Image (tube, rainbow, N blue to C red):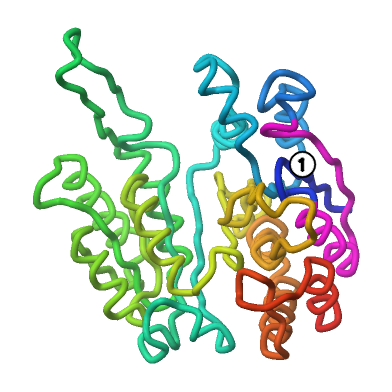
Amino acid sequence: MTRIVALAGDGIGPEILASALRVLDAIGGFEYEQCLIGGASIDAHGLALTDKTLEACRTADAVLLAAVGGPKWDAAVAADPSASRPEQGLLGLRKGLGLFANLRPVRPTGPLLDASPLKRERVEGTDLLVVRELTGGIYFGESGRSADGRSAHDDCSYTVEEIERISRVGFRLARTKLTSVDKANVMESSRLWRETVTRIGAEEFPDVPLEHLLVDNAAMQLVSRPTDFDTILTENLFGDILSDEAAMLSGSLGVLPSASLGEPSATDASCCRGMFEPVHGSAPDIAGTGRANPLGMLGSVALMLRHAIGDEDAAAALESAIDRALEDGLRTADLGGDASTEEATRAVLSKL
């Protein structure tokens, strides 16, 4: 049996996680351990991530995370900046599990093409993947303010080893070409990035075409010609921005999955330790109403099947079931319809 740690978290998290577990039950071969994270863990234990939960995740085959955060805990932090934040649980998991590669696939399906803010003919045929480095760069560099408070700094730092390992992920996942995004005309860290990606490509992946784009140009090209991209490789800050920009090509954050991966398995190089979660947040305004869109969560299950379990057939079958449910008219509230979480789950299960 494949062992999954299931983290419902906060807001709509328990509702969409329940949908995910029903789908996994239909596929078969899984057992689950449910643990607390985020605000729910703060309420129960005073911490967003306990050592017990982290250890359970470390020994599992994969981790499914629904959502964390909400105004209740935001208010607590506003009143006491030293209070625990739900998001600390997510960051703690990434660090504790060694997850350095974030994958964001963007593939607008036919029935949802008109939901995109871009013209249908511009996004039709888009099928791209953003590979974002997750543990380095400006978010993890030294930062601070001067004694007089009149200046501040955030340092962007990368090592060759950090760039090499994320480069290998990007090259392995590229199908037709890899587009590496940097700011090498200005930033020294980007020049090291470009040099290292180029070397890894030449030495280890000579058959994968590689192109380099400056991040400002990439941001423009992403909305002007999204179908020209296959796999986009970039550092932490740029990846954070570009992946959210790319997400809007699909028309709704509610349908988008993501994966955060670590080093390949010692026994199966095609599989990685990973955490899988939808892109959207905890949506506390609709929590408990039965209106949450579970498709981003179910898409994350498909990524888990592919990248952590190594079951491409099951992953493709689930993605096909989601597409065919949408083709048959499934629309939750965020997609302009009125289907409930339960109705959306049943629609996908009926196609699986």
98 and 54: which one is in front?
Answer: 54
Looking at the rendered image, the quarter that the C terminus falls into is bottom right
Q: Which residue is mark 1?
A: 60
Kindly indicate the quadrant of the structure image that contains residue 58. Answer: top right
Q: Is residue 24 left or right of residue 158?
A: right
Kindly indicate the quadrant of the structure image that contains residue 37. Answer: top right
226 and 306: which one is in front?
Answer: 226
Chain part drawn in magenta: 15-40
Residue 106 position, x and y percent, is 49, 71
Identified by mark 1, the residue type is Ala
Secondary structure beneath label 1: loop
Q: Is 34 contained in the magenta span?
A: yes
Asked if 241 appears above or below 46 in the picture, the reply is: below
- At 62% from the left edge and 51% from the top edge, which residue is drawn? 272
Q: Is residue 194 left or right of residue 95?
A: left
- At 70% from the left edge and 45% from the top edge, which residue is drawn? 11
Q: Is 282 contained in the magenta span?
A: no
Q: Residue furthest top?
A: 147
Asked if 225 appears above or below 151 in the picture, the reply is: below
180 and 82: which one is in front?
Answer: 82
Residue 66 position, x and y percent, is 69, 49
Residue 308 position, x and y percent, is 67, 55
- At 76% from the left edge and 75% from the top edge, which residue is drawn? 339
Q: Is residue 242 left or right of residue 55?
A: left
Asked if 194 appears above or below 340 in the picture, the reply is: above
Asked if 267 appears above or below 111 in the picture, the reply is: above
